[in-house]
Amino acid sequence: MMGEIARIEAAKVAPGTAVRIEGGPDGVCLVRVGDDFYAIADRCSHADVRLSEGEVDEDERSVECWKHGSTFSLLDGSPQSLPATQPVAVYEVRRDGDDVVVAEP
């Protein structure tokens, strides 16, 4: 695992939500599904829009871009629907005590 790019207290991220944390070239969209955390780049590959402001689909493990409705997999960053056709970056996530640490893959 490469270096840490962001850190946040786990309790600050409610289940079923996404938050933006600074780090990486586009910021990080950190999503909590139950006790699992996922981190992808916080910029839609189709439009310059923050994915952390979109709806989280816990069952599909995806987040939707609020502007045009593209959804992105939290597992591999791939677009699940048009108009986006390019994936977004995915980051490593680990727990460190009460914190969630995001790192380069």
Image: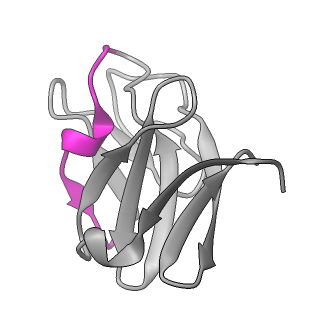
Task: Report the residue at 43% width, 38% height from top.
Answer: 22
Q: Residue 90 appears at what percent x and percent y?
A: 60, 45
Q: Position of residue 89 (x, y in %)?
A: 59, 35
From the viewer's side, name the closer residue of 14 and 63.
Answer: 14
Q: Is residue 12 above or below residue 77?
A: below
Residue 57 in the magenta stretch? The answer is yes
Position of 42 compared to 77: left or right?
left
- Whether residue 67 is situated above or below residue 65 in the rendered picture: above
Q: Is residue 72 left or right of residue 40?
A: left
Residue 91 inside the magenta-drawn segment: no
Q: Which residues are magenta?
A: 47-59
Task: Answer with left or right where residue 54 lies relative to residue 48.
Answer: left
Task: Say which quarter of the image contains residue 12.
Answer: bottom left
Q: At 52% from the left edge and 37% from the top edge, which residue is drawn?
A: 23
- Give the x, y percent position of residue 44: 37, 26
On the image, which quarter does residue 10 sit in?
Answer: bottom left
